Image: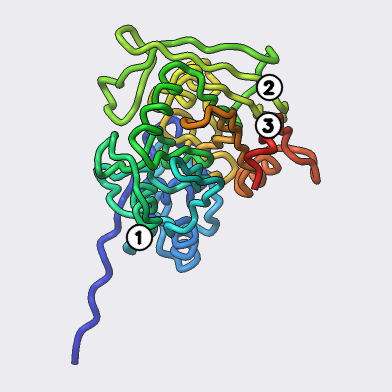
C-alpha cells in the first residue's frame, strides 16, 4: 500500500513592510507567493492559512505590521495570460497598434520568458523590425507588466527608426489614466525629477542626483473620497516614470506594491492604463491617434473607492476618425 505524501511544512511570511499594513490577506499572499487570489481564498476556506498561529476565517482580513502568516500548502504560480488576450487595434504593412492586457510582459526578461507580447508578435507572422534585438522583434517602446493599454509595434526597420525618432523628440504622445492615493489641491501640474536606479533596491527606480531628466504632466479628472483620478502625459519615457513621480509627491498609484501600498480595495495591479497614443505615420506622415477604453478591473476599482454608483470615469480622449475600427 502506498503511503500518502506528507503535507508540506508551513511556509511562514512576516509582514515587515509598513506599506503592507491594511492590505487584504489574499492580496498579500498572492503578491508574495505569485499565485492567484482565487487559489489563496480556497486555501483560507480549507483552513490551510494561519495568521499568528490561528486559522483565518476571512480572505479579506487586513494585515497588520508584524503579523506572521503561515501557509500549509503549495501555492501554484499563476499562469501567464493567454497570448490572444492582446488585441490588435490597427495594422498595416509597416506598423501594428496593440492594446496590451495587464499581466502580460512586453518582451522576455529574467523570470519572464513565456507569454510575452514579443512572442505573440512572432505568432502573427510577417516581417518585424529587429532593431531592438531578435527577442524584441517589433518592440518600439514598452509598458510595465501591470500596466494595460496601447503600444505601437514596427514591422520594418525604417518604420522602427521613424517611430523611435518621434519618441526621442517627444512628438509621439502617450497619455495615461491613473488612480492615485490621496487628494490633489491643484487641478493640473508638472512633476520634474531626475530618475535613476535605486542603489539599495535594484528592482526599483528612484528620484536622485545623477539620474536622467524626467517630466510628467498631470490633470485631475475626478476627485474621490480618498483617491484622485488623473490624466497623465509623459514628456520623457523613463522606466517606472509615472509610478516613481507620483510616489515622490506622496500620491502613489493605487495598488502599486513596489512604490506604494500593495493593494487598494483588492486591486491586483497598479491602477495605470495607457489610454491614448498618437504619432505620425512613419511612411505617409498622417496624424494617427488611438484610444483604449478603461478596463473593467479599473472601472470596478474606481467604484470600490467611492465613485458614485452608475457613473463612468471622466474620459478626455478621442480617437481620430481615420484610426477608428
Mark 1 or mark 2, which has the lower sequence index? 1
Q: Quadrant of residue 278?
A: top right
Q: Position of residue 110 (x, y in %)?
A: 24, 43
Rendered view: 69 above or below 280: below
> Mark on residue 25?
none
Q: Are dots 3 and 1 in contact, CB under 8 Å?
A: no
What residue sits 33% from the left and 7% below the top? 209
Residue 217 left/right relative to 124: right
Tag 2, which secondary structure? Answer: strand
Residue sitting nearer the eye, 227 or 157: 157
Residue assigned mark 3: 317
The mark closer to the camera, 1 or 2, is 2
Sequence-first tag of 3 and 1: 1
| Residue under pointer 1 | 75
* Marks 1 and 2, how far apart at CA: 40 Å
Vertical relation: 193 (above or below) 81: above
> Would you identify the image quadrant in which residue 305 lies?
top right
- Tell me if label 2 and label 3 are in contact, CB under 8 Å: no
Amino acid at each position: 500500500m502506498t503511503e500518502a505524501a506528507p503535507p508540506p511544512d508551513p511556509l511562514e511570511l512576516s509582514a515587515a513592510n509598513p506599506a503592507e499594513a491594511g492590505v487584504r490577506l489574499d492580496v498579500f499572499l498572492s503578491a508574495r507567493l505569485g499565485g492567484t487570489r482565487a487559489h489563496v481564498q480556497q486555501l483560507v476556506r480549507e483552513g490551510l492559512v494561519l495568521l499568528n498561529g490561528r486559522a483565518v476565517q476571512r480572505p479579506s482580513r487586513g494585515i497588520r505590521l508584524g503579523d506572521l502568516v503561515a501557509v500549509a500548502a503549495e501555492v501554484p504560480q499563476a499562469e501567464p495570460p493567454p497570448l490572444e488576450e492582446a488585441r490588435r487595434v490597427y495594422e498595416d504593412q509597416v506598423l501594428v497598434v496593440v492594446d496590451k492586457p495587464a499581466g502580460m510582459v512586453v518582451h522576455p526578461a529574467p523570470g519572464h520568458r513565456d507569454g510575452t507580447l514579443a512572442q505573440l508578435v512572432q505568432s502573427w507572422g510577417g516581417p518585424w523590425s529587429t532593431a531592438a534585438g531578435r527577442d524584441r522583434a517589433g518592440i518600439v517602446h514598452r509598458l510595465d507588466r501591470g500596466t494595460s493599454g496601447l503600444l505601437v509595434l514596427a514591422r520594418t526597420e525604417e518604420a522602427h527608426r521613424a517611430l523611435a525618432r518621434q519618441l526621442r523628440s517627444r512628438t509621439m504622445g502617450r497619455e495615461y489614466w491613473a488612480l492615485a492615493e490621496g487628494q490633489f489641491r491643484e487641478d493640473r501640474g508638472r512633476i520634474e525629477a531626475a530618475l535613476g536606479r535605486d542603489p539599495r533596491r535594484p528592482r526599483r527606480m528612484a528620484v536622485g542626483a545623477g539620474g536622467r531628466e524626467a517630466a510628467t504632466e498631470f490633470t485631475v479628472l475626478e476627485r474621490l473620497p480618498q483617491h484622485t483620478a488623473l490624466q497623465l502625459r509623459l514628456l520623457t519615457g523613463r522606466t517606472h516614470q509615472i509610478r516613481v513621480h507620483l510616489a515622490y509627491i506622496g500620491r502613489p498609484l493605487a495598488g502599486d506594491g513596489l512604490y506604494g501600498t500593495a493593494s487598494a480595495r483588492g486591486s491586483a495591479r497598479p491602477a495605470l492604463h495607457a489610454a491614448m497614443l498618437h504619432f505620425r505615420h512613419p511612411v505617409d506622415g498622417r496624424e494617427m491617434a488611438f484610444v483604449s477604453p478603461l478596463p473593467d478591473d479599473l472601472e470596478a476599482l474606481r467604484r470600490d473607492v467611492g465613485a458614485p454608483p452608475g457613473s463612468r470615469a471622466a474620459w478626455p480622449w478621442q480617437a481620430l476618425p481615420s484610426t477608428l475600427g
